[in-house]
Image: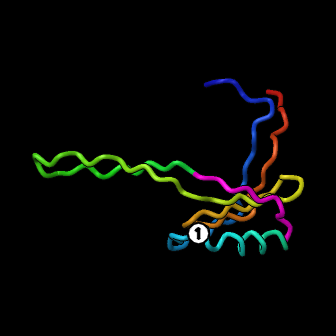
Amino acid sequence: MGEKWAHAPVFCALAQVRHNPVCQLGEYLPKIQEALRQIGYPDARRESLALVRLPAPSTEPGTPPMLPRFEQVPRVICADRERTHACIVDPDKFREPLSIGRQEPHED
């Protein structure tokens, strides 16, 4: 099956809210970051995710295959000072809080 990690990362999302995609997320990020800073998440990092969208294959004979689309999706991760909890803001969802830690080694 594989080796167990001695200090495997542990993630636990308590809540995730999905919403309609915000196409211009960049315009709203300063206000979102400030609101999260005020409630205890001052460490903000902007990232860009590489997303590959694969189209469904056509059932029509003779139809040329559609090519995959590559997109860059912006996101912001706001963490607390100890970097043990974080909120993640994506264009179509908000996850809060995400607990980030290290799993203690265990004996079998």
Left or right: 67 in relation to 77 = left
For the stretch drawn in magenta, what is the main secondary structure? strand
Residue hosting label 1: 25
Q: Residue at x 22, y 45 (%)?
A: 65
Where does the magenta region start and end?
39-48
Residues 18 and 72: in front is: 72
**Whole-percent x and y of residue 41?**
82, 64
Here the colouring is rainbow
How crowded is the residue under tag 1: few (<14 C-alpha within 10 Å), some, or many (20+)? some
For mark 1, give the secondary structure: helix
Is 49 drawn above or below residue 17 in the view shown?
Answer: above
**Whole-percent x and y of residue 67?**
30, 46
Left or right: 61 in relation to 48 = left
Q: Residue at x 59, y 66 (%)?
A: 93
State which quadrant residue 24 falls in: bottom right
Left or right: 17 in relation to 81 = left
Residues 40 and 17: in front is: 40
Left or right: 10 in relation to 91 = right
